[in-house]
Amino acid sequence: MLMRDLFDKIYKDKGPLGKWAEQAEGYFVFPKLEGPISNKMKFKGKEVITWSINDYLGLANHPEVRKVDAEAAVKWGSAYPMGARMMSGHTDLHEQLQRELAAFVSKEAAYLLNFGYQGMVSTIDALVSKDDVIVYDVDAHACIIDGVRLHLGQRFTYKHNDMESIEKNLQRATKVAEKTGGGILLISEGVFGMRGEQGKLKEIIELKKKYNFRFFVDDAHGFGTLGKTGAGAGEEQGVQDGIDVYFATFAKSMASTGAFIAGDEEIMNYLKYNLRSQMFAKSLQMVLVEGALKRLDMLRTMPELKEKLWENVNALQGGLKKRGFDIGTTQSCVTPVYLKGSIPEAMALVKDLRENHGIFCSIVVYPVIPKGLILLRMIPTASHNLEDIEETLEAFSSIRERLENGTYKRLSAAVAEAMGEKI
Ligand SMILES: Cc1ncc(COP(=O)(O)O)c(C=O)c1O
């Protein structure tokens, strides 16, 4: 067989999303939202209501948060501390933040991660060895899938949130583990970020009575938004104790960068000495640590932020349902709107929303969701108001009418031709 240049395939095929770059970049993908992070920002010079930012509690641009971030930057610069935690980058404030996070999510201990994505990959890697078996949801976030990819042993996916499939795969995993002498790690999300459903944490934990497994939950979208105190999906479902390893990122409710895991002290101590993404990477900067302490304090002491968030979530989701929109089976702040149409129609529709209605939301199409479906994904936050919601609902009714009467089909014919796609 003739060998080829490594880059040949890249020159030929840009990948499922990359192939749209020419038509989509700068507008549908890699758009530039400008101005302070809030309910309204600027897109291509025009003001738009932003529904695509995971700043659930509206902390990103909160004056108290901005003040602490700025003061910490003056005090520490952006470098401090230098080196990995294990070697030279460890501080009292890192430990304090871990203690406070652990207490907030009702676990014995916590450990900081520089980024959620890498931290998830690394935690999965550290928790399993080749004799162990991983069982995980087929709709899991990419960071879970990548963590599982590192696993040298067996892994089984179950149908999304499907208890029958979970049980069947636990039985398969048990058979394997009985042969290898290993254990089972089951991984779910607290909230699935695309469709907004909560993971079936309660039912899964119930299965611990029948099967021997440990439960790892990625609660990126649940932390700060769900549960009486905001401790997430486990608290919401009354089963926080049954989660063996809890994960949340600072990239959403906490409006920052960084993440953490929490669980029993002995397990966190093990991870402290075995998490390769932390052992071999620079410590989380002090600006982020001090910023996280402030944000966590606000989560604890300002319940009105979460109340405002949910007032907006209920108004948006209730309004959409009242107008007959299909918002699927969301059980969280994540608000998907499903419409039927081709990719070029979706592009024309989003352009209309942005240019003529001043509404900016994320658009998801095939191959992320089935062909023929358009998913407009909205993230309400505490910084939105009822006026934003009313305006958005009106705009959605208008675009649905235009979608149904074929306006976008006509508008998109030229786009479709350019893309070589039939609509
Ligand atoms: C479910 C889930 N897990 C993990 C991550 C990664 O977190 P980070 O942005 O901190 O890398 C994200 C995205 O932010 C996410 O949505």
Image (tube, rainbow, N blue to C red):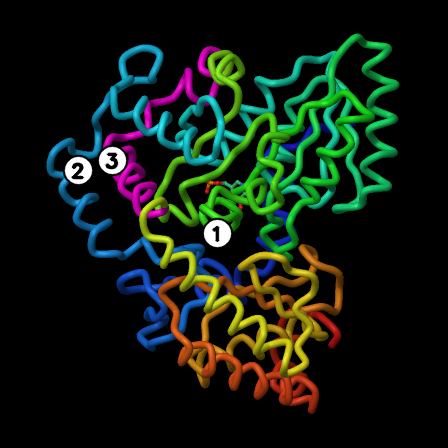
Q: Secondary structure at mark 1?
A: loop
Callout 3 crowding tier (Cα within 10 Å): few <14, some 14–19, many ≥20:
many
Q: Main secondary structure of the magenta part?
A: helix
Depth check, front residue: 141 or 201: 201
Disc tally is: 3
From the viewer's perspective, tell me whether residue 50 is left or right of residue 347. Answer: left
Find the magenta span and give its range. Answer: 272-299
| Mark-to-mark CA distance, 3 and 2 | 7 Å
Dividing the picture into quadrants, the one containing residue 241 is: top right
User: In what quadrant of the picture does the N terminus appear?
Assistant: top right
Residue occupying the point 84% across, 34% down: 167
The residue that label 1 is drawn on is 225
Instruction: Report the residue that reaches farthest toward the left.
Output: 74
Q: With respect to residue 5, does 341 lie above or below?
A: below
Measured as percent of width and height from the top left, residue 11 is found at: 59, 46
Estimate how packed mark 2 is, as few (under 14), some (14 to 19) or many (20 or more) residues with alpha carbons within 10 Å. some
Q: Which mark is residue 290?
A: 3
Which of pointers 3 and 1 indicates the residue nearer the eye? 1
Q: Position of residue 302 (x, y in %)?
A: 33, 52
Look at the numbered disc 3 and give the secondary structure of its residue.
helix
